[in-house]
């Protein structure tokens, strides 16, 4: 989660306003967070807000989208496969846009490789 001061708002680039933490426990009137930071944001007299981090939300959306893409080519499946990619995509057990060799898969994997380098 992101822990921020109410005055400063969320600012991922400034640890005096926002830090990342992990929720360890939620009680009736408290939330226990674990973080690598040694200080809380603000000056000690601040009210805090907790937000989901963008990476958590984005990763869940990406996972869901990739699952949907992987499941099936829909109406684009070849009835009479001619080349190796069409034969692979025609296999009911392996249908999906993200199979190796499919144009979309190659583009996504190339982009992921460039982004993680």
Image (cartoon, rainbow, N blue to C red):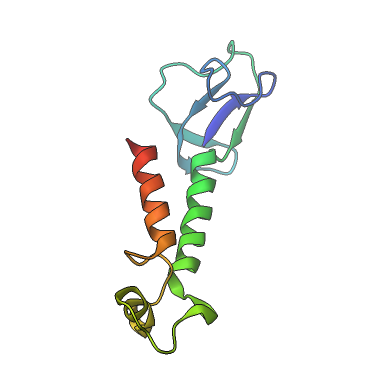
User: How many numbered circles are shown?
Assistant: 0
Residue under the image location 46 percent in, 57 percent down: 63
Query: In this orientation, which residue lies closer to the viewer: 107 or 17?
Result: 107
Q: Look at the picture and state if 103 lies above or below 87.
A: above
In the picture provided, is 107 more to the left or to the right than 41? left
Residue under the image location 37 percent in, 84 percent down: 81
Which of the image's four quarters has the C terminus?
top left
Q: Look at the picture and state if 93 lies above or below 54.
A: below
In x, y percent, where is residue 55?
A: 49, 41
In x, y percent, where is residue 47?
A: 66, 23
Residue ranking furthest to the bottom: 80
Residue ranking furthest to the top: 43
Query: In this orientation, which residue lies closer to the viewer: 57 or 65?
Result: 65
Residue under the image location 58 percent in, 19 percent down: 17
Q: Look at the picture and state if 52 lies above or below 69.
A: above
Quarter of the rendering containing residue 54:
top right
In the picture provided, is 117 more to the left or to the right than 108? left
Q: Look at the picture and state if 108 lies above or below 16.
A: below
Residue ranking furthest to the left: 84
In x, y percent, where is residue 66?
A: 46, 61
Query: In this orientation, which residue lies closer to the viewer: 28 or 79?
Result: 79
In the picture provided, is 117 more to the left or to the right than 26? left
């Amino acid at each position: 989660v992101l822990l921020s001061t109410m005055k400063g708002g969320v600012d991922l680039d400034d640890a005096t306003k926002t830090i990342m933490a992990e929720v360890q426990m939620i009680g009736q009137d408290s939330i226990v967070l674990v973080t690598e930071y040694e200080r809380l944001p603000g000056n000690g007299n601040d009210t805090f807000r907790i937000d989901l981090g963008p990476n958590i939300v984005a990763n869940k959306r990406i996972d869901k989208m990739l699952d949907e893409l992987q499941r099936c080519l829909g109406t684009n499946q070849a009835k009479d496969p001619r080349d190796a990619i069409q034969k692979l995509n025609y296999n009911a057990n392996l249908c999906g846009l993200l199979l190796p060799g499919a144009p979309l898969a190659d583009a996504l994997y190339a982009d992921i490789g460039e982004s993680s380098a």
